Amino acid sequence: MQRFSGHRARHRLASPPCPHGIATAMATLAALLAGNVGATAQDLSQPGPFAGGWRTVTVTRPNSTTFNARLHYPATGAGGQNAAFDPTGGPYPAISFGHGFLQPVTQYQSTCQHLATHGYFVIASESEGGLFPSHANFAADLRHCLTWLEQQNANPASLYFQAIETQAFGLSGHSMGGGASILAAAADPRVRVVANLAAAETNPSAIAAMANVSVPVVLISGTQDSITPISTNTQPMYSAGAAPKQLPAILGGFHCGFTDGSFIGCDSGGISRSQQLAITRRLLTQSFDLYLKGDPTHWRSVWGPERDLATDVTTSAASGILVGPLDLTIAACPGSVATAPLTVTNTGSFSTSYSLSAEDSSWPVTITPAQTATLPPGASATFAVSIDTPPGVLAAQTTALVSARSDRDGGTRGWTRVTFQRPAGRGDLNCDGVVSFDDIDAFVIALSGEAAYAAAYPDCQWLRADCDCDGAVTFDDIDPFVRQIGQ
């Protein structure tokens, strides 16, 4: 789902009353707030909790020919070449990485080692490094690397026996290797996500192959790339692909800014190489963490509101999920439950169910049901968002971030915001700006009818006495009115 700045229609719905126990509401609120204490955003451009090790391995193709690959992995001690493998955090997800045209895998050492420190195997094929590479063969070798990982995981004699999460494979690569990663993903059902760098058009066409990729694709690019410009490479790839898909464009980023060093024919950009590599590390890590580790803490940076707050990247995105209405506002009276219907629509190309959740609200929010049925493309499902509004004097409003997560890939989300707003003036029957014992006489008059109240207080609204927000002034309003006075 694309998010747009600017004006959005706002919707206001009446909310039926549903009294709830004060103790239960406050206990739920306290638990919700306690769960949010201490939450801090992790800087994913920095190394993870492991040391990074690497070594050269030999991969055998089905036809018995071989090629070398550099394997990066979580290591013990200081890490480095041939460092001891650290199995303590395993099994680890794995990524097959493709180098650029005429580029040695050493050009991507910092990026691959960074991922290793965050708990990934990264295997970078050294094949097809000559002047006339076969893109099809290179894509096949990226897949052969995944097979090698499967074999190592199943071999009791291997250092990596049962240490590789073979159900969590990703693909990456730069330039030619980025294009090859798309070719590989289109042909390999083992792949869960593709996140590549300045992907180049290939032969066979990576642009055409995007139509056959059925997993999330993140086409990280640079706005000042003069070797594989966005307009002729990643933008056509993005346009040809199905949701979920993203094209994060690093502002001032350049083609060679994704490598550790310059080479003949390199371009330059508006930011330094170190700046670009830091942004790249962040984007890769958050995407792989979300889809390969199932870490929900990164969804807001990948698909949620934090993504659009980034000042160093502009992102085109299509989640294939529409949650609406956008920016809904409903009335929520103190001591009652306010409920409003929302809809999730599958705007993508693949059938999936959705898991529904809410966060950020300072008042307890419930979503019913918590999961939809499987929806084919174009289908919708409705669900109810309810807030348990504590009694007493409250803030004027609270806002919940409501999201629908694709159960097909476990990471992609669509979202909207729902604002629960306390109606102004409820209980303030004499219109002096506060709810106090001075309002009791006016409240009694209001209970006798609208005409009597209007005669006594011509400048006030009779529905100020509707303290349970059911749309009428009745004896049912006495308890919530008394509770407001007691605060």
Image: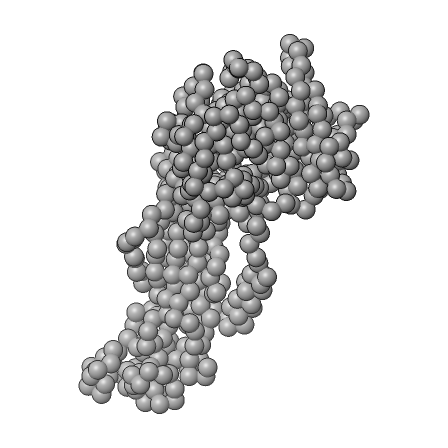
Q: Nearer the viewer, residue 355 or 266?
A: 266
Image quarter in which the N terminus is found: top left
Q: Nearer the viewer, residue 137 or 448?
A: 137
Q: Is 243 placed left or right of 454 in the picture?
A: right
Tell me the residue at 71%/42% (across/down): 51
* Residue 319 visible from this viewpoint: no
Residue 355, above or below 390: above
Q: Nearer the viewer, residue 267 or 122?
A: 267
Image coords of residue 297 (percent x, y): 55, 49
Residue 227: which quarter of the image?
Answer: top left
* Residue 114 visible from this viewpoint: yes
Image coords of residue 314 (percent x, y): 40, 43
Tell me the residue at 40%/37% (across/down): 223
Tell me the residue at 73%/39% (across/down): 79
Image coords of residue 304 (percent x, y): 45, 48
Residue 216, above or below 338: above
